[in-house]
Image (tube, rainbow, N blue to C red):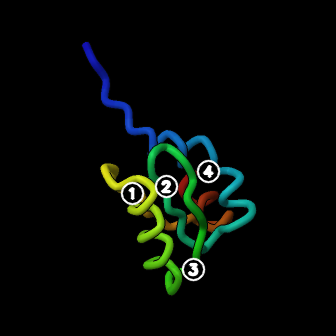
Amino acid sequence: MRYYHDPNHACFTKHLQKLVKAHGGKWVVIAGGSLIGVASEAELKKLTALARKRHPKDIPLIAPIPRKEELECIL
């Protein structure tokens, strides 16, 4: 049986705790299995364009980074 592996999602999961601690409430853009950057919602368009330029064949992962208190509510 083969499993689907998304390198962008894996990168997000791997770095989630650090992202929450340092950048909770902002947005993360990941492409090609690498963190492209963290931005406010207003800056997201530039960061998404950079991700598409660096990894044109990849669909970037664009996700909000939860705040620490939001994450605690989920758990």
Q: Secondary structure at mark 3?
A: loop
Of the numbered discs 4 and 1, the one sitting upstream in the chain is 4
Q: Residue at x 39, y 62 (%)?
A: 52
Q: Residue at x 68, y 67 (%)?
A: 23
Q: Are marks 4 and 2 in contact (CB under 8 Å)?
A: no
Reading the image, the residue beneath label 4 is 16
Amino acid type at mark 2: Ile
**C-alpha separation, residue under disc 4 versus residue under disc 1:** 16 Å
Depth check, mark 2 against mark 3: the one in front is 2
**C-alpha separation, residue under disc 1 versus residue under disc 3:** 16 Å
Reading the image, the residue beneath label 3 is 40
Of the numbered discs 2 and 3, the one sitting upstream in the chain is 2
Of the numbered discs 4 and 2, the one sitting upstream in the chain is 4
Depth check, mark 4 against mark 2: the one in front is 2
Amino acid type at mark 3: Ser
41 in relation to 75, above or below: below
Reading the image, the residue beneath label 2 is 30
In-image side of 68 versus 43 (left or right):
right
Q: Are marks 1 and 2 in contact (CB under 8 Å)?
A: yes
Of the numbered discs 3 and 4, the one sitting upstream in the chain is 4
Q: Quadrant of residue 2?
A: top left
Reading the image, the residue beneath label 1 is 60
Horizontal and vertical percent position of residue 69: 66, 66
